[in-house]
Image (cartoon, rainbow, N blue to C red):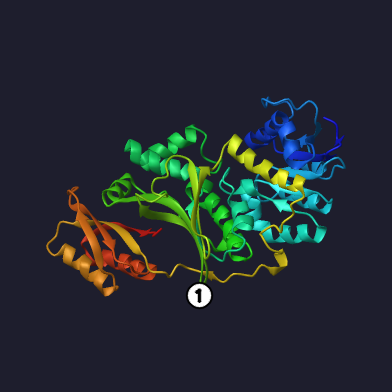
């Protein structure tokens, strides 16, 4: 296709990173050239690409594109209008190439959540200074258009809360544990063999990947600077098959749930395991699917659900950003000028909530009374309690509390062991209302 047609000047892409997503973008451009031009009024073409290994078989014809081994060289080419960064990593080549692209007058489309979570404010300020835009729909929740929903569709709302399941691997592990009755370690290894885990698995199961996404969404929702360092993180490694079964008995599902909300104390951001009602949209979410729930003062609650990763969904999100640029849509990186974003006061969750408690109670006279006394002294009342069959000298006891604070829960958990009737550490998981 020529670089110039009657309908408009071509938008020329330089793609850095030819993994699953990068090749997905190439395929969309090649397969839907006429459709893309019809929808934007101009051709969208690829002029150059970059990856570490040129000889690798990538299941796509790349012969018509210029090749750059150095992504910085790609980012500064004269025949590139939009630098598409799909390499990943929050330092090194990805960061250097994005900075070079902005300084060279290029717009940027990226799927790099870690880079934005760590350096989003500086990058946004640079983009504004250079008169460029950074688009990153693919960085959060794969094919779900949550960034566009926040920055455009809900721009007239004051957001009250953002929450969701934002890591498909964790959701796969938790639902697979429940469906197959398998322990965490077995399903973790299964997910690893299937290629679902990052090279550093803790990015997934430790909540870091999802925490990056939550920090980005919180910035847009509440007009604050990205503050990943203030996200409370807890992974799913301590969740046992027994927790999943017992929670199910009580009408709940366990999810790695991200929640961000602005409170009188400051911005609360947490990515932690929570119990949600089994009948709720989040409770019914299975496999590797993502879901984001947005609550605005005018719109109320809306639910976005879809594929959170994969070649097609993520490439689809990248192309949505590319087409917006082709149409001339230019928005501030985080929904408003970077210089107007506030430094949020970090806040640990103080909002009362019900909690799920699991503890192993020793077979001793008055044991249950001692546990109840500890809870009472911490100001915690019991909503429901169940005791299961004995295992050796102790029996698992599950307690669902009435609404209380995390501080009160931590105080009680710390006081269980000195009673001499509780074996091992108690597990406490917040129950999130939807």
Where residue 293 sits: x, y (%)? 49, 54
Judge by depth and name the residue closer to the eye, 329 or 15: 329
Dot 1 alpha-carbon crowd within 10 angstroms: few under 14, some 14 to 19, many 20 or more: few
Q: Confirm whether residue 48 shows in the render.
A: no
Judge by depth and name the residue closer to the eye, 33 or 352: 33
Residue in view at x 60 percent, y 35 percent: 312
Residue in view at x 33 percent, y 63 percent: 354
Residue 156's place in the image compared with 173, above or below, is below
Residue in view at x 56 percent, y 66 percent: 158
Q: Confirm whether residue 160 shows in the render.
A: yes
- Report the quarter where the N terminus lies: top right
- Report the quarter where the C terminus lies: bottom left
Residue 342's place in the image compared with 216, above or below, is below
Drawn side of residue 26 relative to residue 285, left or right: right
Judge by depth and name the residue closer to the eye, 423 or 119: 119
Where residue 49 sits: x, y (%)? 77, 35
Residue 26's place in the image compared with 167, above or below, is above
Q: Which residue is mark 1?
A: 264
Q: Quadrant of residue 226?
A: bottom right
Q: Secondary structure at mark 1?
A: loop
Residue in view at x 63 percent, y 57 percent: 151
């Amino acid at each position: 296709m020529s670089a110039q047609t009657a309908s408009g000047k071509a938008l020329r892409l330089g793609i850095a990173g030819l993994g699953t997503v990068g090749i997905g973008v190439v395929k969309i451009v090649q397969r839907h050239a006429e459709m893309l031009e019809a929808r934007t009024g101009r051709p969208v073409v690829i002029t150059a690409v970059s990856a570490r290994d040129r000889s690798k078989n990538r299941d796509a014809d790349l012969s018509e594109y210029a090749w750059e081994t150095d992504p910085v060289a790609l980012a500064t080419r004269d025949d590139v209008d939009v630098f598409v960064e799909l390499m990943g990593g929050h330092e090194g080549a990805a960061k250097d190439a994005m900075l070079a692209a902005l300084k060279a007058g290029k717009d940027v489309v990226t799927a790099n959540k870690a880079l934005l979570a760590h350096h989003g404010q500086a990058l946004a300020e640079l983009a504004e200074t250079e008169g460029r835009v950074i688009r990153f729909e693919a960085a959060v929740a794969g094919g779900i258009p949550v960034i566009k929903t926040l920055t455009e569709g809900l721009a007239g709302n004051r957001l009250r809360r953002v929450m969701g399941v934002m890591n498909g691997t964790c959701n796969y592990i938790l639902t697979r544990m429940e469906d197959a009755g398998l322990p965490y370690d077995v399903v973790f290894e299964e997910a690893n063999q299937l290629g679902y885990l990052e090279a550093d698995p803790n990015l997934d199961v430790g909540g870091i990947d999802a925490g990056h996404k939550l920090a980005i969404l919180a910035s847009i929702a509440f007009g604050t600077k990205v503050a990943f360092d203030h996200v409370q993180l807890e992974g799913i490694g301590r969740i046992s098959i027994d927790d999943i079964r017992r929670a199910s008995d009580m009408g709940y599902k366990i999810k790695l749930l991200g929640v961000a909300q602005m409170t009188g104390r400051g911005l609360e951001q947490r990515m932690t395991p929570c119990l949600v009602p089994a009948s709720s949209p989040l409770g019914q979410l299975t496999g590797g699917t993502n879901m984001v729930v947005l609550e605005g003062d005018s719109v109320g609650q809306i639910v976005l659900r879809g594929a959170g990763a994969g070649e097609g969904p993520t490439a689809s999100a990248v192309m949505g950003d590319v087409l917006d640029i082709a149409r001339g849509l230019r928005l501030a990186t985080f929904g408003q000028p970077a210089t107007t974003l506030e430094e949020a006061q970090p806040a640990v969750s103080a909002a009362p909530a019900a909690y799920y408690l699991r503890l192993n109670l020793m077979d001793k006279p008055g044991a249950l009374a001692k546990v109840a006394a500890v809870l009472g002294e911490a100001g915690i009342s019991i909503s429901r309690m169940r005791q299961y069959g004995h295992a050796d000298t102790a029996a698992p006891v599950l307690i669902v509390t009435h609404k209380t604070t995390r501080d009160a829960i931590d105080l009680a958990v710390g006081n269980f062991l000195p009673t001499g009737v509780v074996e091992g550490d108690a597990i406490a998981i917040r129950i999130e209302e939807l």
